[in-house]
Image: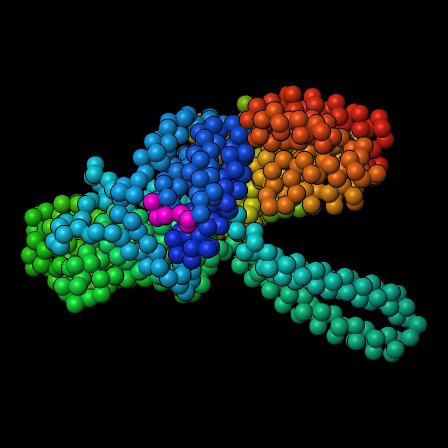
Amino acid sequence: MAKDPYRYFRVEARDLLTQMSETVLAAEQAEPAQALEVPAKMLRLAHTLKGAASVVRLPTIAGLAHAIEDLLTPLRDSARPPSRDDLDAVLAVIDEASQAVAALSGNATPLTAPGYGAAQSSTASASPAASPAASLTGSPVAPDQGTAINAGPSAPVGSPPPPLEGTASATAADVDVDALPLPIMEIPQIVSKELDTLSDSVGESLAHVSTLKRLGAQIADLRKTLPMAPEDLATRLLRLEEQLERGGRQLERELLQTRDYAEQLRLVPASLLFGPLQRAARDAARSLGKQVMFQARGEAKLEGGVLNALLGALVQMIRNAVAHGIEAPEARLAAGKAAQGRIELLVSREGRQVRLRCIDDGAGIDMAALRRTAVAKGVPNAAHMDEPALIERLLRGGLSTARQVDALAGRGVGMDLVRDTVARLGGQLTLQSQHGQGTTLEMRVPLQLGAVRALNVFADGLASWVPLDAVVQVVQRPVINGRQMALGQELVPHVALAELLNPGRQRTQQAPGAALILRSGAQQAAIGVDGVDGVATVVWRPPPALLPPSKMVIGLALDAEQQPLAVLNPEGLIEAARRARPQAAPPARRAATILVIDDSLTTRMLEQSILEAAGYRVHMASSAEDGLEAARRERYALILVDVEMPPGMDGFSFVEKLRADEDLRSIPAVLVSSRNAPEDLARGAAAGADGYIIKGEFSQNAFLDKVAELVARSQLAGLTNRTEGASA
């Protein structure tokens, strides 16, 4: 299967868009002096996004980033802080860019350009009178903080809110869940401390293993001399036995601790959801002319799969609370309430469950109106149901059309989505409401996502699980002929599981101890393993977000010793077996090492993948300063450096410093940039660059030709690192 060319771009783009969105929301609360700095910060983010999109040839997203730059440039040069209408215009383009990023499916099909035109028209038409201005007061949303969302003129008292779901009259309160950019780039930072602790724990365990081995060797030596001095040896052996026992207990404790840390590494904080939910509340309040204080609290950590599954349901809950819970300011004042409504999201972990409560102080559910709606819909016994039964019927769906919701001024819109999400996770959904006082909607979902009967198999010293429903039979000591295996009167594709799981490892060819005959639809294949060890029902979950995606692994599950093992994907294994071809041993040669310097993750990973596929070794740096230090530590055959890497040294200055250094001046350097103005090319040549590559005109063949030319020149000059080993 072809590699996804947008994998790293999506990660970087979502992170950049999240930073931009959060910066806008923070600017609405900032003091004027702080707000003046916002456009310059966002310009840097937009420029990085534009460069990354140009590298992977996504003109729509690059155009949207350019549109953001066009909006921000006059704001940066202005002496006044950006107005709420200015920020609304920027947010509109950010949203469109987020939707474009979410639309990437990894099939290498570039997006077309209609989105850019839409963004331009929307930003061009923005004016102070375009929409009611909203202001955010208070602190940014955080686990223990709230955000006040005040809209402009509200709808007249008693006027029904516009429908937010299931109708053609969508409003700005509609939130595209897929386009909400979660800050997934924060995950490595979040788990860095846990990784350090895990590494320390593993290191201590290994040290104890070494101690036990030494003690075992001493006992073996003593056993050889036992006839010489039995009384003395008995005492010494007893002492060693006690030491071994203590060491074993200590090792067991440390390994259990390591397992607990590994369990924690799969968890991410629920607070990652608070930003998108704050945005959902803000947009819904603005579109309906309501004033809302949104507060989200909770330090609970959840599995990434659960977190992703809950996002859409939580967005719908927040929108419902704003649209059909919180009253208009005039209605609240008439009811003796504060004009500003309050919505609170509380997240907590209780055992193996996650508890999420959405609490509002709005109008609550009008039970009489709900009963009339149920009767009109033909719900059996609706006229005689008590309130708990009515609420239970509401949660089952079917009473949630916008017209009915408007008539009863309660809730129900979008409840199908919430209910289906909770049911899919095997959880529970409850609702409590007091008419005129507010509503609490609570979800409880388990952490375990699935169970399957699986076969425990071993290959190359590693154990894993294979779902049993895909295993047709297990053939002991199969007869293998190259990539095929005889099965009755037919030949089926065969490949060793060890080869699939560790493709780069050199191993001797030997017959497998057993072969699993796997079938998916009309396709089947034989997967060679060293052995099998029974069947068990295992609870599996998706792999942690930190692991690279693999078509052959669908999740992780614990074995009898509570060790995490991979749950293999039969379809992926069959496809890999059918595509497997004998691999010729690569010729031994020395690989040149190239340094890539770019602040864009997408550009770094793209250049690394191209260069490594061509046989080069690649080192990377995210700033010119780090790159210069790396160049002083190790000699490189070539350096590729980005031009713009704010806020530090740019590529031009890097090349100038390189040429001014007696030890580094002969290393070829190529500038890589989205800037293509003649003066930029001239400045690069004046600085001493050996080439200038424009990201928007990137050609892989031309790129590799230029790299090969400069590397060959570098090698002839004797500049390559003499300590490099042969490439794999």
| Residues in magenta, as a range | 80-85
Q: Nearer the viewer, residue 162 or 408?
A: 162
Left or right, 78 with reference to 598: left
Q: Image quadrant for the C terminus?
A: top right
Residue 58, relative to residue 224: is it above or below? above
Q: Nearer the viewer, residue 689 or 74?
A: 74
| Secondary structure mostly taken by the magenta-highlighted segment of the chain | loop
Residue 444, relative to residue 692: is it above or below? below
Q: Position of residue 156 (x, y in %)?
A: 14, 52
Left or right, 428 with reference to 627: left
Residue at position x 79%, y 45% in the image = 633
Q: Position of residue 314 (x, y in %)?
A: 33, 52
Q: Coloured how?
A: rainbow
Residue at position x 59%, y 59% in the image = 194
Q: Image quadrant for the N terminus?
A: top right
Q: Residue furthest front?
A: 79
For residue 244, what is the image quadrant?
Answer: bottom right
Q: Nearer the viewer, residue 392 or 482?
A: 392
- The answer to if 23 sits in the magenta stretch is no
Q: Position of residue 143 (x, y in %)?
A: 42, 62
Q: Position of residue 193 (x, y in %)?
A: 60, 59
